[in-house]
Image (cartoon, grey):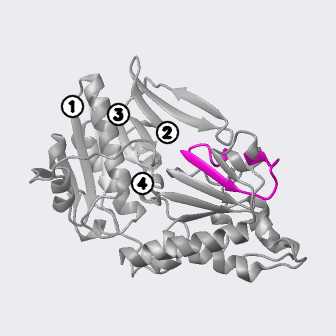
Amino acid sequence: MEKILVLLHVDESGIALPKIALEMLAAGQELATALGSPLTVGIVGANVQAAANSIAGCSAKMIGVAGPEFAQPRYASDAAAAEALCRAADSTIVLACGTSRFSRVMPGVANRVCGKIDTHITSVTADGGVTAGRWFYRQRIEAVLQRSARPWFLLVDSGIHEPWNGEPGTANVELVPVSLPTMRTNVAGVRAPKADEQTIRPDAKLLFVAGAGWTKKQRDGQIHAEDAEKLITDFLHDSSASLGSSKSLVEQSGENQAVLKFMTHMNQVGQTGSTPRHPKGLSTCCHGEEPHVVGWRFIRERRAINLDPNCGWARGKADVLYVADAFEVMKHLNVMVGERTFAAV
């Protein structure tokens, strides 16, 4: 019989679980039910009791590793904690959050317990045994994986499962002791941009993608890069959307062309960029050809603004295409979003 372990960690607040943790819990619960297997939840953090209480209604066995040494992400401490939880649970299938914190340690943990690991998993099902899905070749080929080796670690991406939604309570957490090696690093603090300066927001409901058309000559024959920057940043601030970019736009800085100063390669979406998962997406000044659209594969509702009625978005790749000037549309949209934001305050 399989034994399922769902590995979670607390978020930056130190007491709550991130959204992806709730997604992993729901996926693990569904898999355990389908297989008739016991489910164990392992949590890592400085204090795991509050996080465990928030998911007490899942009816799973709770184990945890807690202490000030586990407050911040660090390879040595996180790997030791995850290894201790895996050995305590004696699990055969381990579902772990595909966060940056766990992504860098899970391959090492799998090696320590003589297991196998697959990363960037996009589906986990009980189809004749445990079956995992994964995309290859720039999200163009979907593979279905099965392994006989155990334990099998599955590092699961976010946005593939509905988050667990249950009642909180008082959880009984069994704390697992960990023998830490000598720590060679010390976390002195965290430096991060202000929340309203952050443009990449994985949990945002809307993905706003800008294309190279924003920095080209407009109807008056002039380039209005500064106006474009203000329109886009105002929209991101008021809507809390996540910002994406086409490859051509982020590479213009090396071609001595006008650029959007807040745009980096981290914002790139597409065949050579990221493949985000947001409920809705709005593309502006982007022609919508195949390399761009690959990055939109998992966006549920796709809309685009383009002056060309024959652009790639019009060929069945967008649910709605607005044939209009993006500058004018975004001016009106910012007014509407700004009024809604003011009314909410």
Residue receiving disc 1? 38
Q: Picture quarter containing residue 112?
A: top left
Residue 102 is labelled as 4
Q: Which residues are magenta?
A: 294-313
In front here: 91 or 233? Answer: 233
* Residue type, mark 4 in image: Phe
**Badge 3 or badge 1: first in the primary sequence:** 1
| Residue type at numbered disc 3 | Ile
What amino acid does circle 1 point to?
Pro
* Front residue (pair 297, 37): 297
Residues at circles 3 and 1 in contact by the CB criterion of under 8 Å: no
Counting from the top left corner in percent of width and height, residue 146 is at 47, 25
Residue at 9%, 50% (x, y): give it.
172
Q: Secondary structure at mark 4?
A: helix
Q: Label 4 to label 1, Cα distance in Å?
A: 23 Å
Q: Picture coordinates of residue 43 (x, y %)?
A: 26, 53
Q: Which residue bears the numbered disc 3?
A: 93
